[in-house]
Image: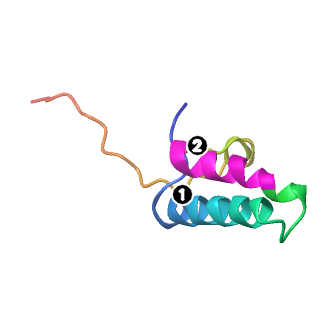
Amino acid sequence: MKKNVGGIDRVVRIAAGLALMALAATGQIGAWGWLGVVVLATGVFSFCGAYTLLGVNTCPMQDEAKPDTP
């Protein structure tokens, strides 16, 4: 799995996932709030399957090791 969720996107996903689960646990929203588990997981693992299908990547590019050439 290549990371495709980064920075602010990751923080927002974790916060939103926790908020949805808390609202579902307290009965303020319906059972669909437990989908926050998926949102939380995408933030924790920095990977979103939908982003892969759509070709989106919010993770900053990492420098690839380049071999030394004269």
5 above or below 15?
above
Mark 1, other Cα within 10 Å: few <14 / some 14–19 / many ≥20: some
Q: Which mark is residue 49?
A: none
The one nearer the camera, 37 or 52, is 37
Q: Residue furthest bottom?
A: 28
Q: Position of residue 60 (x, y in %)?
A: 42, 55
Q: Which residue is mark 1?
A: 58
Q: Which residue is rendered at x = 61% and y = 45% of the image?
A: 41
Q: Position of residue 49 (x, y in %)?
A: 70, 41
| Membership of 45 in magenta stretch | yes
35 above or below 66?
below
**In terms of secondary structure, where does tag 2 sit?**
loop
The one nearer the camera, 64 or 15, is 15
Q: Quadrant of residue 32?
A: bottom right
Disc 2 marks a residue whose amino acid type is: Phe
Contact (Cβ within 8 Å) of mark 1 with mark 2: no
Q: Position of residue 5 (x, y in %)?
A: 54, 52
Q: Which residue is mark 2?
A: 47
Disc 1 marks a residue whose amino acid type is: Thr
Q: Is residue 4 left or right of residue 67?
A: right
Q: Residue furthest left?
A: 70
| Quadrant of the snapshot with the N terminus | top right
Q: Nearer the viewer, mark 1 or mark 2?
A: 2
Q: Is residue 1 left or right of residue 39?
A: left
Earlier in the chain: of badge 1 and badge 2, it is 2
Which region is colored magenta?
A: 34-46
Q: Residue furthest front?
A: 26
**In terms of secondary structure, where does tag 1 sit?**
loop
Q: Which residue is rendered at x = 31% and y = 38% of the image?
A: 64
